[in-house]
Image (cartoon, helix red, strand yellow):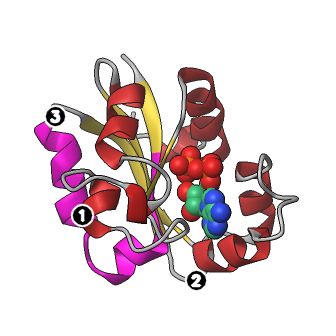
Amino acid sequence: MDKTLIIFKPDCMKKMLLGTVLSRFEAEGFSVAGCKMMQLDSALLREHYAHIAELPFFPQIESFMASEPVVVMILQGEGVVGKVRELLGPTDSTKAPAGTIRGDFGETVMKNVVHASDGPEAAEAEIKRFFSESDFIK
Ligand code: ADP
């Protein structure tokens, strides 16, 4: 079964939109295969955002992502990786169309509600990064 890694970001948590956003994923037939609440630290964020860690705006992203505990989740279902990215819309919330999660609930390019893996290889690596065997119910 296809899986993807989702992070409900601090803006989503602060606005109490966790249930609203999750219901959009569930309405597409995707189910929760793992879930936990985490306070993200600098080391984990630098690894997760290695592709942008050297950019000038990275310190702002780091402090935003560490500003509130977040919910990290594995969603599963056929085609979940691509479909979830479609449901999110583009990175910049101000350019995301109405009807997408970022278009409806995002504020800026940074405060964009949810992280979702951008491909199957990224999903596999990110699931390993955020979850360990002991997090799963046997
Ligand atoms: P996505 O999350 O859509 O895959 P990226 O991997 O490019 O996008 O960026 C990771 C996160 O960094 C974005 O979701 C957003 O929160 C933040 N970000 C990206 N570009 C910018 C920017 N120009 N200014 C501020 N924050 C940004």
Residue identified by numbered label 3: 28
Q: Main secondary structure of the magenta part?
A: helix
Q: Is residue 17 visible?
A: yes
Above or below, 46 relative to 122: below
Instruction: Point out residue 72 in the picture as x, y percentages from the top left corner.
Output: 46, 55
Residue flagged by tag 3: what amino acid is it?
Glu
Which callout, 1 or 3, points at the residue further toward the start of the chain? 3
Q: CA distance from mark 1 to mark 3?
A: 17 Å
Instruction: Point out residue 100 in the picture as x, y percentages from the top left corner.
Output: 26, 51
Quadrant of the frame with the C terminus: top left
Numbered badge on residue 104 = 1
Residue flagged by tag 2: what amino acid is it?
Ser
Single out the residue that lies furthest toward the right.
54
Residue identified by numbered label 2: 67
Instruction: Point out residue 107 in the picture as x, y percentages from the top left corner.
Output: 40, 74
Q: Are marks 1 and 3 in contact (CB under 8 Å)?
A: no
Residue at 44% across / 64% down in the picture? 112
Say which element carries label 2: loop
